[in-house]
Image (cartoon, rainbow, N blue to C red):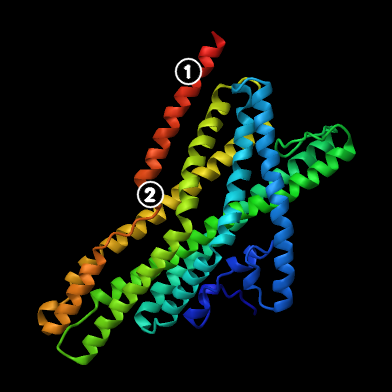
């Protein structure tokens, strides 16, 4: 009887995680250079060039639409335009970053693959399989959830047109271009293609970060296991194990530095965007009068997504920082008293290196406190909007 074999059940642990994200990144050619054949690389590169032009046209169409709405009407009545344009703006920014930092991210992936291949201890294999299973589950969940959200935004105007014969748009773009059904069709093609592009990259970049972070946490757990089972006895074997731990730690720190360099701009932008979108979304849900169930679903959906994404960024950043900072404790808890002077010196060097702080976010430290501060900032701006609304009514 045929049974399904999950990826984490593969025979070799080096084959468990094969970076399926690269395939999904190349759906639109964002990582054309990583295609398996020269012909495919060439065509994906051309596709990427065309789609980038389309994305930037869409970006400016949204920005101009928001400016026009604010210049023609009440600011409070047009907050939904700002909210709806938020995912498109973030998606465009992530497209630029995923292409710009392709080399750094791919180098991080290759470095993590090398560390997995160097894991030859049988006792560590269950640990690696458990961690990589989490990585597969998280990757699949984000992929399915993000795809469902994009499909929801794409299907909404089609369903309204089919059952109510009304011409609606996915988001506000300039020019409006929905006076006739022909115009609506071409407007939908333009917006729909870009919702696929921006929506896809909106969660794919996050998926890359989370999978890299999960792999780094896996390596930190392996290193911690090696340290806690380290026996020092003046032998060359003990020297080799200490050297292996130090080399492993240097590789982990390098992977953390590469991931920090590639993600600091996106994380900072994600924090700012979350404050704006969460504030305007809650304001729309609670205080605006002219709001229907369709708008409520869109607001609730996007609000939930951006909060979960920011929390995941903060949690992974906090967890890697915490685990790196606690490696020196694992080094100290070894049986270092029985080691030689040279072994003690090496262990001291390792513990000193492990005290170096690993901080994500660039100019702003990203951890769980950041998530709480973002929520506090959102509440502050929400009170500002409430006060502005009350002022306008009087």
Q: Earlier in the sequence, mark 1 or mark 2?
A: 2
Viewer-proximal residue among 294 and 193: 193
Residue 299 appears anywhere in the view: yes
The residue positioned 41% from the left and 33% from the top of the image is: 377
Considering only vertical position in the picture, is 79 above or below 93? above
Point out which mark residue 387 bears. Answer: 1
**Residue 154 position within the rendered picture, expressed as x and y whole percent measured from the top left:** 73, 45
- Reading the image, the residue beneath label 2 is 363
Q: Split into 4 quadrants, where in the image is the C terminus?
A: top right
Structural crowding at the residue carrying mark 1, measured as other residues with C-alpha within 10 Å and reported as few (<14), some (14–19) or many (≥20): few
Structural crowding at the residue carrying mark 2, measured as other residues with C-alpha within 10 Å and reported as few (<14), some (14–19) or many (≥20): few
The residue positioned 26% from the left and 87% from the top of the image is: 240
Do the CB atoms of the residues marked 1 and 2 lie less than 8 Å apart?
no
Considering only vertical position in the picture, is 346 above or below 272? below
Viewer-proximal residue among 139 and 85: 85
Distance CA(mark 1)–CA(mark 2): 32 Å
The nearer-to-camera label among 1 and 2 is 2
> Mark 2: which secondary structure?
loop
């Amino acid at each position: 009887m045929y049974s399904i074999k999950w990826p984490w059940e593969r025979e070799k642990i080096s084959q468990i995680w094969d970076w399926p994200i690269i395939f999904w990144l190349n759906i639109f050619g964002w990582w054309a250079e990583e295609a398996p054949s020269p012909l495919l690389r060439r065509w994906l590169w051309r596709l990427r060039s065309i789609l980038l032009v389309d994305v930037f046209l869409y970006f400016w169409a949204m920005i101009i639409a928001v400016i026009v709405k604010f210049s023609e009407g009440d600011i409070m009545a047009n907050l939904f335009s700002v909210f709806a344009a938020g995912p498109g703006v973030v998606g465009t920014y992530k497209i630029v970053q995923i292409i710009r930092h392709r080399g750094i991210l791919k180098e991080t992936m290759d470095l993590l693959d090398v560390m997995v291949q160097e894991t030859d201890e049988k006792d560590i294999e269950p640990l690696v399989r458990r961690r990589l299973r989490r990585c597969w589950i998280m990757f699949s969940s984000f992929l399915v959830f993000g795809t469902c959200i994009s499909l929801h935004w794409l299907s909404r105007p089609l369903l309204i047109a089919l059952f109510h014969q009304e011409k609606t748009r996915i988001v506000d773009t300039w020019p409006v271009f929905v006076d006739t059904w022909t115009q609506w069709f071409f407007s939908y093609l333009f917006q729909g293609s870009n919702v696929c592009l921006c929506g896809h990259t909106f969660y794919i970049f996050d998926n890359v970060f989370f999978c890299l972070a999960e792999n780094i946490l896996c390596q930190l757990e392996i290193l911690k296991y090696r340290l806690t089972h380290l026996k020092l006895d003046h032998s060359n074997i003990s020297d080799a194990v200490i050297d292996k731990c130090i080399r492993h730690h240097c590789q982990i720190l390098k992977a953390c530095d590469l991931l920090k360099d590639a993600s600091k701009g996106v994380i900072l932008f994600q924090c700012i965007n979350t404050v704006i979108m969460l504030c305007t979304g809650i304001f729309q849900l609670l205080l605006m009068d002219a709001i229907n169930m369709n708008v409520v679903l869109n607001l609730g959906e996007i609000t939930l997504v951006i909060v979960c994404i920011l929390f995941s960024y903060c949690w992974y950043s906090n967890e890697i920082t915490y685990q790196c900072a606690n490696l020196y404790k694992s080094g100290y808890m070894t049986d270092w008293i029985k080691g030689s002077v040279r072994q003690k010196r090496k262990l001291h060097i390792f513990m000193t290196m492990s005290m170096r702080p690993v901080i994500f976010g660039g100019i702003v430290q990203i951890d769980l406190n950041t998530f709480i501060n973002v929520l506090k900032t959102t509440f502050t701006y929400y009170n500002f909007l409430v006060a502005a609304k009350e002022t306008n009514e009087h």
